[in-house]
Amino acid sequence: MLPLLRPAWPAPAEVGAAMSLRQGGASTGPWAALNLGVAVGDEAAAVAANRAAYAEALGARPVWLRQVHGVQVLELTALTPDQPEPAADAAWTRAPRVACTVQVADCLPVLFALRDGRGVAAAHAGWRGLAGGVLQATVQALCRGTAAEPADVLAWLGPCIGPRSFEVGADVLAAFGIAAAAADLPHFAYCPRADGSPRWRADLPALARQRLQACGVREVSAAGDCTALDASRFFSFRRDGVCGRMAASVWRR
């Protein structure tokens, strides 16, 4: 059985959730071992074997997305096909044993469940998606599709690149509507380079929590792990460049 990270959150028993680690798969080289990404240079046969093992470990059918760092939210049903992978960065469902699934290798995976288990969702939230509103769009789609309120939604923030490792420039601040300044800013710690050029360390989980709470989600749990600082368990694009992808999934049992 594959080693999986199970969220510590108050989701009901009707909801299953898990995130893959990098151990336990068939891939080799920089993709070792459980690479679940099809577009990162790994051998197709290895990825197929890894995805099959992941689905077996979940006990549900993960629906894979072609992620584009956007805000599109897809509704999944029992009839949603496996191929071609739809272009979207979030998905929600009411269907049992259909796993809303996102891939990450530093970006923030966010899982959602209604308190009564009637619906679930997952979102891929890098800085572009966060700035664009992917989390708000996911909450809105889940609530609209299930006649729920944001206060009924539980959220879990999975492992991602942490604020000690995620250095960004003024372009990222601008995407969040923040004017660059030579100072600490909310969720951006000022860390100029040796030559004096301005840089900041971004806190993705804090930015996500802020956006979720602003749209009415009151219960937000977080893993707290930094993918860039733990090479034994996590892939990290910022750390390694060429690497595999992990997946985070949530489903109704």
Image: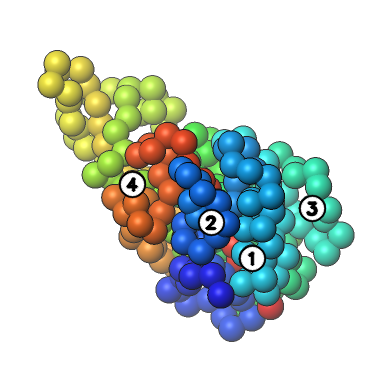
Name the residue type under label 1.
Ala
Instruction: For marks 2 and 3, give the one nearer the viewer.
Output: 2
Instruction: For marks 1 and 3, give the one nearer the viewer.
Output: 1
Q: Residue at x 32, y 30 (%)?
A: 168
Most foreground residue, 154 or 147:
154
Q: Where is residue 86 in the image (x, y as percent from the top left)?
A: 75, 43
Q: Position of residue 152 (x, y in %)?
A: 57, 69
Instruction: Report, in whole angstroms, how far the alpha carbon at label 1 lies from the one at label 3.
Output: 16 Å
Kindly identify which residue carries mark 1. 53
The answer to whether the residue labelled 3 contacts the one labelled 4, judged by CB atoms less than 8 Å apart, is no
- Nearer the N terminus, badge 4 or badge 1? 1
Kindly identify which residue carries mark 2. 34
Q: Position of residue 207 (x, y in %)?
A: 38, 46
Pick the quarter of the image with the C terminus.
Answer: bottom right
Numbered label attached to residue 82: 3
Q: Callout 2: helix, strand or loop?
A: loop
